[in-house]
Amino acid sequence: PTNRCNLSCLPCPVNVDLRREKGLMDFSLFKKIVDDNPQLDFLHLTFAGEPLLHPKLMDMISYAKSHGVRVGVVTNATLLSESLAQQILASGLDVITFSVDGVDDTFERVRGVSYKAIETNILDFVAASKTLANPVKTEVSMVLFHETLPEVESFQRRWKGRVDWVNIQPQ
């Protein structure tokens, strides 16, 4: 939906190497992509940007869902307010992945934002989701690089049992 991001994380090329113009996908283009691909089964609304920045993200999710497409997003969770969480839950989203590189001080060095705030946003979302008949599947993912390498075990311990999946992904 967008290649814009509100953070400048260490392992991410979006604000460093990405040279193309930054912008938002037009909703009419999104609808055309869905309409032109009736075989589409799963749509991952994320690549090189923070999807929650797109003002039409809920419309995109709802449109894809109305065409029988399962939908997932990856987010840094910084914008995940209670109000936005309720909108996401109402949209019919199937899977949400929270990109969380490290825990505590490491996370704050890598991401430049408060770990506790992000953890709270994620756990509040998970709790709200569990009240639904069909909860959104949740995952936390950590990119493995020199800063986060020592954190693998603590990251897994911190999140196991709190979300559906814990993913460690190579850079």
Image (cartoon, grey):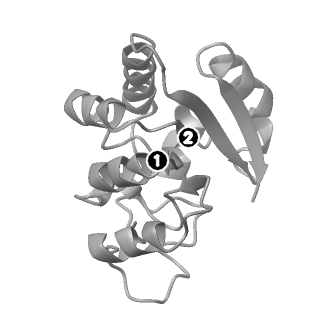
Q: Amino acid at mark 2?
A: Thr
Residue 108's x, y, as percent?
49, 42
Residue 81 image point, x, y percent: 25, 33
On the rendered image, what quadrant is the C terminus found in? Answer: bottom right
* In the depicted structure, whether residue 114 falls above or below residue 36: above
Q: Quadrant of residue 151?
A: top right
Taking the spot 26% from the left edge, 28% from the top edge, the residue there is 86
Nearest the viewer among 9 and 131 is 131
Helix, strand or loop at label 2? It is strand
Q: Earlier in the sequence, mark 1 or mark 2?
A: 1
Figure check: 65 above or below 115: below
**Residue at the image position 29 percent from the left and 60 percent from the top:** 54
- The answer to whether residue 29 is seen in the rendering is yes
Q: 68 left or right of 128?
A: right
Relative height, residue 158 to residue 38 (above, below)? above
Total marks placed: 2
Circle number at residue 75: 1
Of residues 90 and 82, the one drawn nearer to the viewer in this rendering? 90
Given residues 170 and 3, the one toward you in this image is: 3
Q: Give the x, y percent position of residue 118.
A: 41, 33
The outermost residue toward the bottom is 20
> Mark 1–mark 2 contact, CB under 8 Å?
yes
Residue at the disc numbered 2: 97
